[in-house]
Structure formats: C-alpha cells, structure tokens
Amino acid sequence: MRVPTGKTSSASRPGKRAPSALVALVLTACGGAITDVPPGQAFRLHIGESARIEGTSLIVTFRDVLEDYRCPVDAVCITAGNGAVALEVRAGAGGERLVLNTTEEPRESPVGAYVLRLRDLLPDPLAGRPIPREAYEVVLELSPS
C-alpha cells in the first residue's frame, strides 16, 4: 500500500491517466489490499480479500460462502456435510467466478496452467453457534497442473 507523499501524481492532473491508481482504488473499494503469494504454497483469505500469485497475472478473490452445512466439531454426524465458497479469479482484464466445495465436487478447478484447490474453510462450526460472515476464511492453493 502506498503512503501519500504530498506530491501531485498523474492521477490528479487533468487529461492524464493513472491506471495503477485506478486499479488500487477499485481494489480498495472491493475489499482491500492484495497479498502476494508464491505458487504451490497454501494461503488464507477472508471474504473480500485477494491474493496475487507471484510470477503470474492471476489474482484470486474470496467473494462469499454460498453454503455451510459442515458437521459441527462438537457433534456426531452421519456425514461430514459441505461448505461451498465463491471465488473470483482474474488474469489481466478477464475474470471468472468459481465455486469450490469442502467435501463435494468440485474441490479444485483448472485455472490456465494451474489448479486452484480449496484446502479448508475456517472456522470449524460449533453446534448451535452461527459463524459471522466476517469470521470466514478459506485456505487455498494454486499449483502448476
């Protein structure tokens, strides 16, 4: 994140474009800073957060939890249940929405020459205690396919 220096940037001069400033403004409005992560390494995102995969033009954003029917850790269940999350993957100007699951398919999706995997949805649920939206976190990994 940049720290204001008091200098006039090209974004404040009429007739000049500052694409990087515009991108930063849009990203800030959509949820905040982007974290850089190396491919092949697991990374965590809260809803609205994004990660840029080093050495690529890929940016992964955690958009929402679409369902959370996972078995609470303090309960006995017949099945593990499922959590489904919405992700956005952008490469340059293009982007696509993906839905990945904790136990059902798909748990991973091809993204160009890579595979994006949902490793975990956190926090683990507890019986009778709803999880606040802002507490959700995904653990993802993008690896070469």
Image (tube, helix red, strand yellow):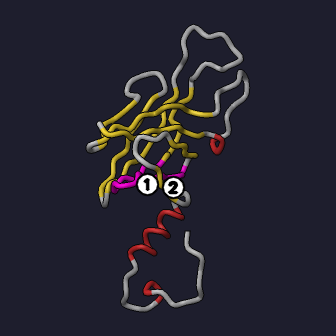
Front-most of 40 and 138?
40
Label at residue 8? none
113 left or right of 71 in image: left
Give the x, y percent position of residue 23.
43, 68
> Badge 2: how crowded within 10 Å, few (<14), some, or many (20+)?
some
Front-most of 89 and 145?
145
Above or below — where is 125 with respect to 48?
above
Above or below — where is 106 with respect to 97?
above
Element type at marker 1?
Answer: strand
113 left or right of 67 in image: left
Front-most of 115 and 132?
115
Q: Which residues are magenta?
A: 48-61
Residue tagged 1: 52
In terms of sequence position, does the residue under pointer 1 or pointer 2 come before the other? 2
Which quadrant would residue 5 be assigned to in this image? bottom right
Above or below — where is 90 with respect to 20?
above
Which quadrant would residue 104 be assigned to in this image? top left
Give the x, y percent position of residue 64.
52, 42
> Hey, what amino acid is under mark 2?
Thr
Residue tagged 2: 35
Above or below — where is 27 with respect to 102?
below
Q: Find out whether residue 8 is within the magenta segment.
A: no
Q: Find out whether residue 60 is within the magenta segment.
A: yes
Front-most of 43 and 74?
43
